[in-house]
Image (cartoon, grey):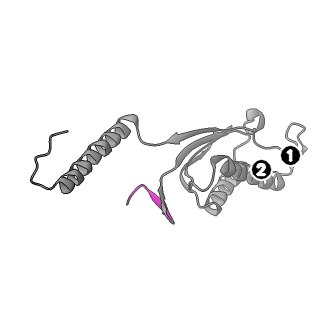
Amino acid sequence: MSRFRKISQTIWHCQYHIVWTPKYRFKILKGEVAEEVEECIRTFCLQQKCEIIELSVQVDHVHLLVLIPPKISVSKFMGIVKGRTAIRVLNKFRKLRQQPYWGNCFWVRGSCVDTVGLDAEMIGKYVKYQDDRKKQVVKIRINNILGATQPFPPL
């Protein structure tokens, strides 16, 4: 199976490594809270038609390796996942709302996002191959226009 996915007229492979933390990086993601966070992330990824490659909920941060379709921006995806998990966690574990430092915020504002893709050497080979292929196509077209009777000088 190809690593690429397909939607209507687009093939894509948009894979991201995303890390984010609870507010003040408190070590709160354990036990039932961690289970709820993981379940929420899986549910909301499925709703957004995103594919989870790896998910790890640590006591003070979350690692997510995910394929996000190109029609969804990473910031929109993160807004949905973080916003909805915060609502569900704070509603299920009401004692967390009583802490003066939480308020209505469960996650920090930001996150760390890194693209996961081809390495530079592979991209260089691909680009070089495309350039060689283009030269071959041009040579064939010129030969067809001039006719095979005239010799074609090498490029």
Mark number for residue 86?
2
Give yes or no for residue 9 being in the magenta stretch.
no
C-alpha gap between disc 2 and disc 1:
8 Å
Residue toward you, 77 or 6: 6
Which span is picked out in magenta?
A: 1-7
Q: Which label sits on residue 18?
A: none
Query: Could you tell which of marks 2 and 1 lies nearer the N-terminus?
Result: 2
Horizontal side of residue 78 vs 87, given as left or right? left
Q: Which mark is residue 104?
A: 1
Q: Is residue 132 above or below residue 45?
A: above
Judging depth in this view, the residue of 67 and 34 nearest the camera is: 67
Q: Where is residue 131 shown, x and y percent of the image?
A: 31, 42
Quarter of the figure with the C terminus: top left
Image quadrant assignment for residue 25: top right
Residue shown at the point (19%, 56%) measured from the top left: 144
- Identify residue type, mark 1: Asn
Residue 91, located in which quarter of the rendered image? bottom right
Mark 2 secondary-structure assignment:
helix
Q: Is residue 58 visible?
A: no
The residue positioned 40% from the left and 35% from the top of the image is 120
- Relative to 15, 76 lies left or right: right
